[in-house]
């Protein structure tokens, strides 16, 4: 049976949506989420009553969801309005009086539909809905492994990262819905819908955004910067790395392929990039800066990782909870490789991924030997 994308508002559908959220967040991702009722197996959220909830339905069951919340409706909940303002710093966007603002959240999809085109249909329905409702700016908080997908849709980074509630380290992003030039540049699937809607219309909010956020985009939105320069930086990183590294044995073309399939992410000193036991599935390659890896055990010291080294590889390989906290010691730059991208590359670029996975195995083996030696030394010292 085919899948349908619907906006739901009746009590029965919303009840099912709260159970679907519980299945994904608690049973599947093992998260402690605000609003979770373990007895009824539901996650309730007061924003549902003022938002538009889009769902993927198949056989009358919900298999995916996404929520649009509008800033003018959010004012009815002052505490939540303040929370979102702190998260996204959207006050200048409101003051520009250039249209409605909305927030995309609660994106989730059943494992059986992951990798299918239905996710793009869900996003397209949300884009069309926002356009029809007069939205000019849409915000989201993307986990690192989803940032590349959002950037392909047309979202851009414009501020520093956040540690949000129980969901971990997230990346605030904004989409200027009617920025035709940017959507065309990033190959957004929304471009056709936008062109049909604009019909040559000039959109003042696009010029306002570029005028007021140029510096922020140059600082944070690395996807939109000069690709050849960024690639040269990655080549230089690969050349500098020696011994057991992620780049060992890769040709120049393979380094470029790996670079294309990662998302460049700036971080700042003090950023809590990984929380212990957090359920995330991406690996990070450090290009600039350094991080501290802490396991909160008396018999182990913090490990400092820097340029050319990786962290988060256990989550990439096993899709299980994180084994340590990772905190940035200084400002820097990392490349994010998601598990979904890695699985796709195994099929499309098997030679590249065979080398990458072998390199990860060698790095893990080296770290295990180091940990064993440290434990022996710790026991010897009493």
Image (cartoon, rainbow, N blue to C red):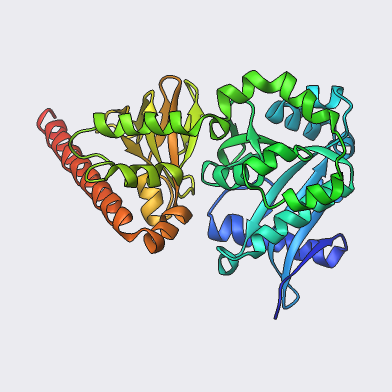
Compared to 130, does 237 lie above or below?
A: above
Residue 54: x, y in percent?
78, 58
| Residue drawn where x is 49% and y is 27% of the image | 267
Residue 183 visible from this viewpoint: yes
Depth order, front residue of 148/28: 148
Q: Is residue 130 left or right of residue 339?
A: right
Query: In which image quadrant can residue 13 be found?
Result: bottom right
Q: Is residue 83 left or right of residue 289?
A: right
| Residue drawn where x is 74% and y is 32% of the image | 84
Residue 331: x, y in percent?
45, 20
Residue 259: x, y in percent?
41, 41
| Residue drawn where x is 84% and y is 33% of the image | 203
Compared to 363, does 85 lie above or below?
A: above
Q: Is residue 362 left or right of residue 293?
A: left
Q: Is residue 288 left or right of residue 251?
A: right
Residue 44 visible from this viewpoint: no
Q: Residue furthest bottom?
A: 1
Residue 373: x, y in percent?
13, 37
Q: Residue furthest front?
A: 200
Quadrant of the frame with the C terminus: top left
Compared to 329, does 115 lie above or below?
A: below
| Residue drawn where x is 32% and y is 55% of the image | 353
Depth order, front residue of 292/221: 221
Compared to 67, does 155 lie above or below?
A: above
């Amino acid at each position: 049976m085919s899948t349908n994308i619907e906006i739901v508002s009746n009590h029965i559908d919303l009840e099912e949506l709260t159970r679907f959220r519980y299945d994904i967040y608690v049973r599947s991702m093992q998260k402690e989420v605000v609003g979770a009722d373990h007895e009824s197996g539901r996650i309730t959220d007061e924003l549902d009553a003022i938002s538009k909830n889009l769902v993927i339905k198949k056989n009358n069951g919900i298999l995916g969801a996404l929520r649009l919340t509008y800033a003018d409706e959010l004012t009815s909940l002052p505490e939540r309005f303040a929370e979102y303002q702190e998260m996204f710093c959207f006050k200048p966007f409101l003051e520009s009086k250039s249209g409605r603002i909305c927030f995309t959240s609660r994106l989730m999809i059943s494992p059986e539909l992951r990798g299918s085109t239905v996710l793009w249909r869900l996003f397209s329905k949300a884009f069309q809905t926002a356009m029809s409702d007069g939205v000019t700016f849409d915000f989201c908080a993307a986990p690192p492994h989803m940032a590349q997908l959002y950037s392909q849709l047309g979202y851009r980074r414009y501020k520093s990262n956040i540690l949000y509630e129980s969901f971990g380290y997230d990346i605030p992003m904004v989409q200027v819905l009617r920025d035709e030039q940017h959507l065309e540049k990033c190959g957004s699937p929304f471009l056709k819908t936008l062109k049909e809607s604009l019909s040559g219309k000039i959109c003042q909010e696009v010029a306002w955004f570029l005028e007021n956020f140029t510096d922020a985009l140059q600082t944070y939105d690395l996807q939109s910067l000069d690709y050849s320069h960024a690639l040269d930086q990655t080549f230089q990183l690969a050349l500098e790395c020696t011994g057991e590294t992620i780049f060992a044995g890769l040709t120049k073309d393979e380094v470029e392929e790996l670079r294309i399939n990662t998302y460049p992410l700036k971080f700042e000193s003090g950023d809590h990039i990984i929380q212990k036991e957090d359920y995330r599935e991406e690996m990070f390659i450090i290009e600039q800066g350094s991080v501290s890896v802490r396991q909160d055990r008396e018999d182990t010291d913090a490990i400092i990782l820097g340029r050319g080294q990786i962290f988060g590889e256990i989550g990439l390989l096993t899709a299980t909870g994180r084994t340590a906290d990772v905190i940035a010691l200084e400002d820097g730059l990392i490349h994010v490789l998601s598990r979904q991208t890695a699985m796709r590359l195994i099929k499309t670029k098997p030679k590249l991924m065979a080398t990458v996975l072998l390199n990860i195995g060698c790095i893990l083996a080296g770290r295990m030997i180091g940990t064993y030696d440290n434990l022996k030394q710790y026991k010897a010292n009493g």
